[in-house]
Amino acid sequence: MQLLDWGDSRHYDQSGSRPCALCGKPTPLRSHAGEPVHKVCAEDWNHSQPSEARRYTHPDKQQSQRDIGTWRFHNDGPTAPRKAANVVRLPRPDIQTLELPAA
């Protein structure tokens, strides 16, 4: 199971908890699309629905689903540009076979 990296503070809504779109329990966490969802619920959904598009189902069963504009719950992008690594190839050492004298 792939774990999501939601380290950015934008995933935490300080205005309060709302019901998770997947389990219905209160959560202050938000997906990238602003949908209230526990990180663990999002990871479980991604794992159990490997090829499905993500749809938000409102807790009211009389309303239809609406597309929240994302295909999957996804990770935060890199926060800092990656530094270029300088790779230096060293010459291979000449390995000689050591012969031991007979005992």
Image (tube, grey):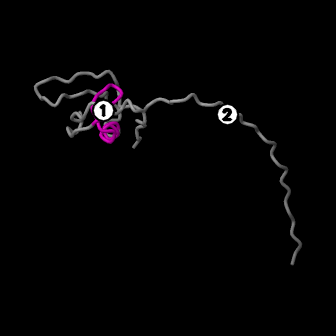
Amino acid type assigned to the residue bearing label 2 in the image: Ala
Amino acid type assigned to the residue bearing label 1 in the image: Gln
Q: Name the residue under label 1.
A: 14
Disc 2 on helix, strand or loop? loop
Residue 97's image quarter?
bottom right
In x, y percent, where is residue 20? 24, 35
Work out which quarter of the rendered image holds the N terminus and state it: top left
Residue 85 is tagged as 2
Q: Residue at x 41, y 41 (%)?
A: 3
Drawn side of residue 21 relative to residue 97, left or right: left
In x, y percent, where is residue 29? 31, 35
* Number of numbered discs on residues: 2
In x, y percent, where is residue 63? 13, 23
Disc 1 on helix, strand or loop? loop
Relative to 69, residue 48 above or below: below
Q: Which residue is drawn at 86% across and 56% down?
A: 96
